[in-house]
Image (tube, rainbow, N blue to C red):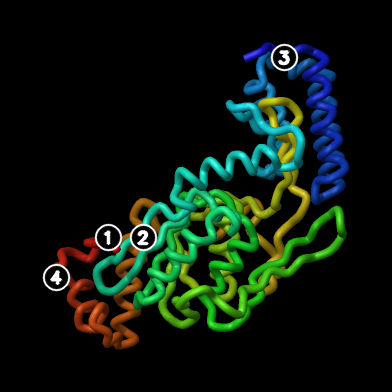
Amino acid sequence: MTQLQSAEITGIVTEAGRLATELYVFPEIGARIAARLDEAHAQGRYRQAEDARTLGRLVTEDLQSVNGDRHLRLKFHPEPIPAEQEDGALLAELTRSADLSLGGVPRIERLAGGVALLKLAPILFPLDMAGEALNAALTLVARAEALILDLRECVGGHPYTTAHIGGHLFDEPTHLSSLYDRETDAEQQFWTPAMAPGPRFGGSKPLYVLISKATFSGGEALAYDLQQRGRAVVVGEASGGGANPRRGFTLHPHLEATIPTARSINPVSGANWEGTGVIPDTATDPARAHETAHRAALAEVARRGGDTPSASAEEARRILHGATEDGPAGADARL
């Protein structure tokens, strides 16, 4: 990789500070961040950055030093990134990632007792990239007696995709979230759609959401919105704490400045999960969250007196209290 020249470093740091000042969702903090970058540059902090990776790390530390916003970054990309459009690096990365992750639906399983598990990762891709895969997965789990939504490795996503998923998990249009945008000084609301392509899982059957400290941004949004509406029980550990959506700007062929220009507002809490993370209803080791949620789902199905062939109340009781013909409670089968 080509060594960075002094003038290059100055230009990159200056532009990162300008973007923070003009676009960061909290103007006063943006100005403080820019001042921090100027001070660090004047003190020679960035002279040690002989390559783009090192500069990205140092500037990211300073961008996040004022208020800990993990969406604020000077992100290093090993492959050259597009310079001609805003968020060009993100779009290129999303396209590759969507192709490699089966549209963000890497796992679907039918667990014992008529419970389905749907894993969404690494992010909730824009619908024009992964809508078909997502719709197919949601249609497949719609018949389950209970659903476990695994977001433990979901690190981002698009608000329209969150609302689209919600359309399968509620019976009526529901206001999930709003975004306040600094540039427009306005809020945009996101509602679940009135119609869903294919059958819905619906708004009444048991729903559990798994999270971990790795869950971030759009993954957190889905968990938080479902939790605040009382639609899901969240299981695992507190998530990463990133609620300020970002825009991306190419400052170098391998460096992208990501600047949060908006903030999430939940219509129920009036707040969001920035800094604190989504707090689980049932705290447990995320490695065991799957098992914890499965047992809770079985108990709830039994309590409701499930009478379908796939998940009768008697079957659920047998699984809860020991092995069945299908094996222990954790046993599963591929759909």
Quote the CA–CA distance across marks 1 and 2. Answer: 7 Å
Mark 1 against mark 4, which lies toward the viewer?
1
Residue at image mark 4: 324
Question: Whole-percent x and y of residue 224?
Answer: 58, 64
Other residues around mark 2 within 10 Å, as few (<14) / some (14–19) / many (≥20): many
Residue at image mark 2: 108
Of the numbered discs 3 and 4, the one sitting upstream in the chain is: 3
Residue 131 placement: quadrant? bottom right
Question: Whole-percent x and y of residue 309?
Answer: 23, 82
Of the numbered discs 4 and 2, the one sitting upstream in the chain is: 2
Residue 141 in sight from this viewpoint: yes
Quote the CA–CA distance across marks 3 and 4. Answer: 64 Å
Mark 4 against mark 2, which lies toward the viewer?
2
Instruction: Mark 1 and mark 4 in contact? Answer it, CB < 8 Å.
Output: no
Dot 1: element? strand
Quote the CA–CA distance across marks 4 and 2. Answer: 22 Å
Q: Amino acid at mark 1?
A: Arg
Dot 4: element? loop
Spot the residue most to the left: 325
Of the numbered discs 1 and 4, the one sitting upstream in the chain is: 4
Q: For the point 80% across and 57% down, which residue is it?
A: 181
Instruction: Mark 1 and mark 2 in contact? Answer it, CB < 8 Å.
Output: yes
Quote the CA–CA distance across marks 3 and 2. Answer: 46 Å
Of the numbered discs 3 and 2, the one sitting upstream in the chain is: 3
Foreground residue among 206 and 281: 206
Q: Is residue 254 left or right of residue 42?
A: left
Other residues around mark 4 within 10 Å, as few (<14) / some (14–19) / many (≥20): some
Q: Amino acid at mark 2?
A: Ile
